[in-house]
Image (tube, rainbow, N blue to C red):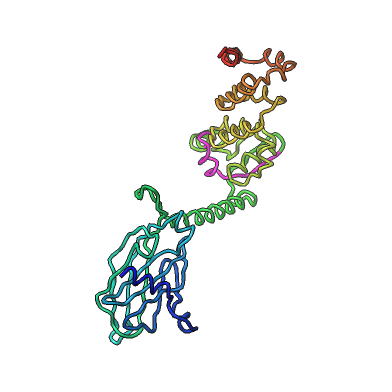
Amino acid sequence: MARKSERRRRGGGGGGGGMERENRVETISRLAQWRIDTFGPSSYRRSDSFKIGIWNWYLSVEKARYVYVRLFPEPGRVAKERPPLARFLLRACWSGPPRRSCVSPVHEHLLRSSEDFFWQLDTMYAGRFTIDVEFLDLKIASNNAKSSTSIWPNESIAVQNIASKSSLGCLSRMLTESIHADVTINTTDGVLKAHKAILASCSPVFESMFLHDLKEKESSTININDMCLESCSALIGFIYGTIKLDQFWKHRLSLLAAANKYSISDIKDCCEESLLEDINSSNVLERLHVAWLYQLQKLKKGCLTYLFVFGKIYDVREEINSFFQHADRELMLEMFQEVITAWKPI
């Protein structure tokens, strides 16, 4: 039957505008439907291609002793490199009268060619009929089929992005328009408005202020006397998700100090990663001091590696004496140990 099917497949499904129209498959969501108006007593028909997921698909129907319905992906690079592991069911319906239908079991197959799957119908009623394919799941097959993941949960990424943008838009309006703002932040040179619930949700220090009988709870005021208005705006913008990249880079050190003071780990981690990106001879000693001050192990290791493993200590010889006069003794010991490690004979 396979050889006979292949000969018919090469012959196509016939010509003419009506036949082309009959070969069209309509799709909606994860459902594909092929309506066939005419079908001879012994013939083969193949549909036009239709798109479900990342693949183009074909349906074919062949009538010999039995009726065979096949589902297969379009041959090509996509099907070869990313073969579909499909979970689906099929339904054949005859218009009647009376209307009749036949539903397949749920199938799950790795589909590479037209020979990988067929559905056998023991009966074939006269008249027009439709073939439906409902895809219940589609996966890109891996070497280990158990680890294959569905392509459709990836749609949730778009939903999450939309939801995130919507949430950020709402938070931005709450901040810029002071919608139901219930806390005042006093900086060294200005005042900001914010929301207790949002500040408390990101910082255990802020939460403690509003939870216990402290002056911040009574007055709904926070005094941040070690930040200017611009730096504090960057801090609040980070918390609300509205901070701009250039604003972040300009105020990284102030943000790091505030993150350490108010125990905001996300900001602290982000600042450390950023400070690692642009270490150079003019800032490495300052970064090393910052790393020591706020216990930033990755940044400290990066600075020591820059100085001693890459030999940039010679570029800061004039600044090193002043640095040693103010450096912590334990930090100086670590630097000495790094020197020994870097210069250890191989």
**Viewer-closest of 133 and 178:** 133
Q: Who's the residue at 63% across and 25% down the image? A: 290
Residue 265: x %, y % from top left: 53, 34
Query: Which residue is at the far right?
Result: 318
Query: Is residue 197 highlighted in magenta?
Result: yes
Question: In the figure, 121 relative to 221: above or below?
Answer: below
Residue 35: x %, y % from top left: 40, 79
Q: Who's the residue at 32% across and 78% down the image? A: 93
Query: Is residue 107 highlighted in magenta?
Result: no
In the image: residue 200, left or right of residue 3: right
Query: Which residue is at the far bottom?
Result: 97
**Residue 268 occupies which quadrant of the picture?**
top right
**Viewer-closest of 189 and 276:** 276
Q: Who's the residue at 48% across and 83% down the image? A: 16
In the image: residue 177, left or right of residue 119: right
**Residue 120 occupies which quadrant of the picture?**
bottom left
What number of labels is visible? 0
In the image: residue 164, left or right of residue 114: right
**Viewer-closest of 123 and 226:** 123
Magenta highlight range: 190-206
Question: In the figure, 170 relative to 29: above or below?
Answer: above
Give the position of the N terminus as an image quadrant.
bottom left
Residue 214: x %, y % from top left: 53, 33
Residue 100: x %, y % from top left: 28, 80
Give the position of the C terminus as an image quadrant.
top right
In the image: residue 145, left or right of residue 202: left
Question: In the figure, 12 relative to 158: above or below?
Answer: below
